[in-house]
Image (tube, rainbow, N blue to C red):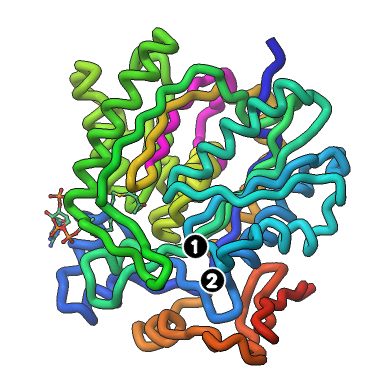
Amino acid sequence: MTAIGIESLSFATSRYFLDLDLLAQARGVETSKFSQGIGQRLMAVAPPDEDIVSLAASSAKKAIENCDDPQNIAMVLMATESGVDQSKACGIWVHHLLNLPSQCRVVELKQACYSGCAALQLALSYLSRHQNKKVLLIASDIARYGLHTAGEPTQGCAAASMILSCQPRLVAIEPEYGAYTSHVMDFWRPNYRDEAIVDGKYSTKVYLEALAESWKAYQAASGRSFTDHARFCYHIPFTRMAQKAHERLAKICGIQAISTEQIADSLLYSQQLGNSYTASLFVGLASLLENSTCDLTGQRIGFFSYGSGCVAEFFSGVVLPGYQQFLHTTHHQQLLKSRQPLSVDQYEEFYKFRLPQDGSRYMVERYRTGDFRLAGIDGHERLYESVI
Ligand code: CAA
């Protein structure tokens, strides 16, 4: 059977971050609550001229660098739950900024943090029938909760982009999967709100229930057990959640002792950028592949995607020989290292920024961004530009 999977993978995040020790001090919370209880150290904060489109375009540009024949990109699937338009697919701006082929389908997908996984599975089905084509999958989100709320330290932002094809170089995705859907109100964002409404503790409970159910379905479909997987990548709303998920899965499977190496490398980037909703699973994969000190060739990774509301899925992939030479490790590590720290006041200023809601012309001050930025708005139209 033809291998189908990930040919290249890159992510982008804000050039600014808030140290959660500062946030803890400002909110009168012990710093160990955020660093240990939540498992987060730094939180990426988007400046006014960075949004899901600019992040998406920056990450996609890098992912395409490793792609031999970008003219074969026949589909752009953009997963997000921070959409900036009710009608136009955000991916069309990315398609335009990157000058992608006009013979291309572009569509936006939504189901909370899960839609990146849905896009992946839809792309794989498409590629099985169109083996010379490629799909650009982008998952891009800015996670926002209210100031002074329990969710505040679990904000963040990133976009992850992947070229999917029948010539995968990083990971071949296996066909077996276990999906699970249940109508729950653990986290949602009505159209008239900028911040999510979340029943935090309940959401963590539902996440773990959805893990159990989707694992059960995956196991029935694949016949595989816990020990058939060398590494695990979970949806990472905050890293402690992924650790709890791993402990829960081991318990369900009757595994007495789990080793930290099964998930530790996948959490390193998210610890430094926070929740990125749809992107977090793929940021976790980049983190695993780029930080692992051992050769993962031939190793099976178990993936768990969770989107509140809720839809979840467990699936797997196998790491391909020579994957190391197609990673963007230096670029990603440099990106994380070169970010500018914010004070709590500066973070709140970025947080409170809003474009005019009447669509009147407003050009946004220039901050540090990736290769693209939101230049402003004019006549209700968002204006993007390249900054290089
Ligand atoms: N030192 C170390 N640990 C400490 C501590 C201290 N001084 N003080 C408290 N803690 C620990 C607590 O014991 C607790 O640990 P356990 O969970 O292991 O019991 C942990 O820190 C969190 O503290 P609280 O129980 O007091 O919880 P909280 O009120 O701070 O809320 C939260 C935590 C519910 C995760 C909140 O941050 C939140 O609502 N986040 C947004 C929702 C979310 O991320 N949900 C995840 C599942 S839904 C999903 O995955 C989709 C998505 O992306 C949103």
Image mark for residue 313: none
Identify the residue at the far front of this view.
Answer: 87
Label 1 residue SS: loop
Tell me, yes or no, whether the highlighted magenta stretch contains residue 304: yes
Which x, y percent locates residue 108? 61, 51
- The structure residue drawn at horizontal position 38% and vertical position 45%, both measured from the top left corner, is 307
Task: Please tell me how crowded label 1 is: few (under 14), some (14-19), or many (20+) other residues with Cα within 10 Å.
Answer: many
- The structure residue drawn at horizontal position 26% and vertical position 45%, both measured from the top left corner, is 184
Image mark for residue 339: 2
- Residue 80, compared with residue 227, is above or below; it is below
Image mark for residue 82: 1
Q: Nearer the viewer, residue 377 or 366?
A: 377
Amino acid at the residue labelled 1: Ser
Q: Nearer the viewer, residue 164 or 247?
A: 164
Rendered image quadrant of residue 20: bottom left
Any part of residue 338 in sight: no
Amino acid at the residue labelled 2: Arg
- The structure residue drawn at horizontal position 65% and vertical position 58%, both measured from the top left corner, is 89
The residue segment tinted magenta is 290-306
Quadrant for ligand 1 reads: bottom left
In the image: residue 243, left or right of residue 53: left
In the image: residue 292, left or right of residue 372: left
Q: Nearer the viewer, residue 237 or 353?
A: 353
